[in-house]
Amino acid sequence: MAIRRTLRSALSIFALTAALGLTACGGNADAGASPSASGAAGTSSGTPTPAVDTRPTPASSAGPARNLPKPEMPAAARENTEAGFAAFTQYWFDTATYALETRDGAPLKTISAEDCKVCNGYLKDAATGGWTIGPKWISTSFVSDLKLDPLGQAVGYFMLDEGSSKWYEATGGLSKERHGGNNGQAKAIYASYANGSWTARQLGQA
């Protein structure tokens, strides 16, 4: 009888020890796996940083142009000559188109006088949040004698070909569409020259 009780006690102790052993192993496994699992979950569930699209994208009905190279002023446009004045005039129109398509008026502002009404009109359009597709302006038949008026301005006369364009509001709605062309009337640009560069002071009909 004593041997049986001893055997039953030993078996009970062995079973209890085994149960505790499994529980301990299980507990240690859970404790060791939990941080790893949570770490993995945190890594997989984290929102990836979106890649910045640096590709040049022209203006479209979906939005303004992005990442376009800024117009480069040709070396001739820095010369105080008739040819230099003509090159500057074309560069001014290139920066105006750039401002309207990209909403970046910095290049246009740099070469425009603060009181230039036409310049400020395009700068305002660029700053309102709207954008355009085009227009591309081409100045031709440029002439100037470079004589200065009492305000120190030279005047140049030219013809202007205007490409087609679409004008969008900040909300994305199409506000107007132009077919472009040339009305056959001469245009004029008033500009001053100082420190190796021209500054547009006014543009309009001749």
Image: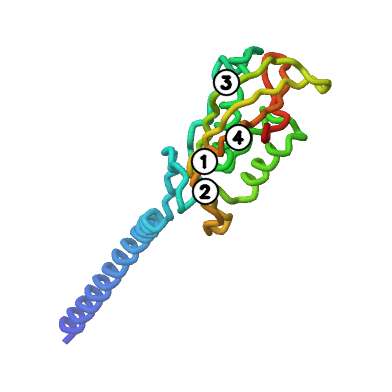
> Along the polypeptide, which appears first: circle 3 or circle 4?
3
Front residue (pair 56, 139): 139
| Residue 76: numbered disc | none
Left/right of residue 114 with respect to residue 109 in the rendered view: right
Left or right: 123, with 181 as reference point:
right
For the C terminus, the image quarter is top right
Mark 1, residue position: 135
In space, the residues marked 3 and 4 are separated at their CA atoms by 20 Å
Nearer the observer, disc 4 or disc 2? 4
Find residue 74 and report its horizontal and vertical position in percent.
54, 19
Q: Which residue is mark 2?
A: 178
Q: Can you give x and y, in whole percent of width and height, for residue 204 in the image?
A: 68, 35
Query: Disc 4 on helix, strand or loop?
Result: loop
Q: Tell me, yes or no, whether the two marked residues, 2 and 1, touch with CB atoms within 8 Å.
A: yes
Give the residue number, with chain letter if any, for mark 4: 185
Q: Looking at numbered disc 4 in the image, what kind of residue is underneath it?
A: Gln
Picture layout, residue 180 above or below residue 201: below
Q: Callout 4 environment at 10 Å: few (<14), some (14 to 19), or many (20+)?
A: few
C-alpha separation, residue under disc 2 versus residue under disc 1: 8 Å
Task: Work out how far the residue at label 2 is from the one at label 3, CA to CA, in angstroms.
Answer: 25 Å
- Badge 1 vs badge 3, beta-carbon distance below 8 Å: no
In terms of image quadrants, where is residue 17?
Answer: bottom left
The numbered mark, 2 or 1, whose residue comes first in the sequence reads 1
Q: Is the residue marked by circle 3 packed among few (<14), some (14-19), or many (20+) residues within 10 Å?
A: many
Q: Residue furthest right?
A: 150
Amino acid on which disc 2 is placed: Arg
First in residue order: circle 2 vs circle 3: 3
In the picture of the structure, the residue carrying the numbered disc 3 is 87
